[in-house]
Image (cartoon, rainbow, N blue to C red):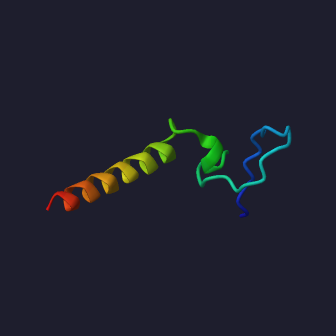
Amino acid sequence: MTQSKCGAPTQSGRRCQNKAVVGSSRCAKHQGSWSAYGVAQRKKKEAEAKMRKLRKKR
């Protein structure tokens, strides 16, 4: 099975040609921060930032 293309409309009026995230019809860029993938990415970045801050305090 091949991975589908995103297909979201871009600013230029064409369709996005990026590969869609597994289990979704959109790529990471067009999926939005509200999606499960976007939330997981944001939480991961926040956790890394928190760890950097804790290490800096020592």
Q: How many marks?
A: 0
* Residue 2 in the image: above or below residue 27: below
> What's the residue at 52%, 39% (across, down)?
33
Relative side of 12 to 3, left or right:
right
Instruction: Provide residue 47's location: percent of width, then percent of height.
Output: 31, 52
Instruction: Provide residue 46's location: percent of width, then percent of height.
Output: 35, 48
> What's the residue at 60%, 49% (across, down)?
28
Relative side of 46 to 3, left or right:
left
Name the image quarter holding residue 11. top right
Relative side of 1 to 28, left or right:
right
* Residue 48 in the image: above or below residue 30: below
> What's the residue at 67%, 52% (across, down)?
20
Q: Is residue 4 visible?
A: yes
> What's the residue at 72%, 55% (across, down)?
18
Relative side of 27 to 45, left or right:
right
* Residue 47 in the image: above or below residue 34: below
Image quarter (top left, top right, bottom left or bottom right) of the C terminus: bottom left
Instruction: Provide residue 27's location: percent of width, then percent of height.
Output: 65, 49
Which residue appears farthest toward the left when viewing the image?
58
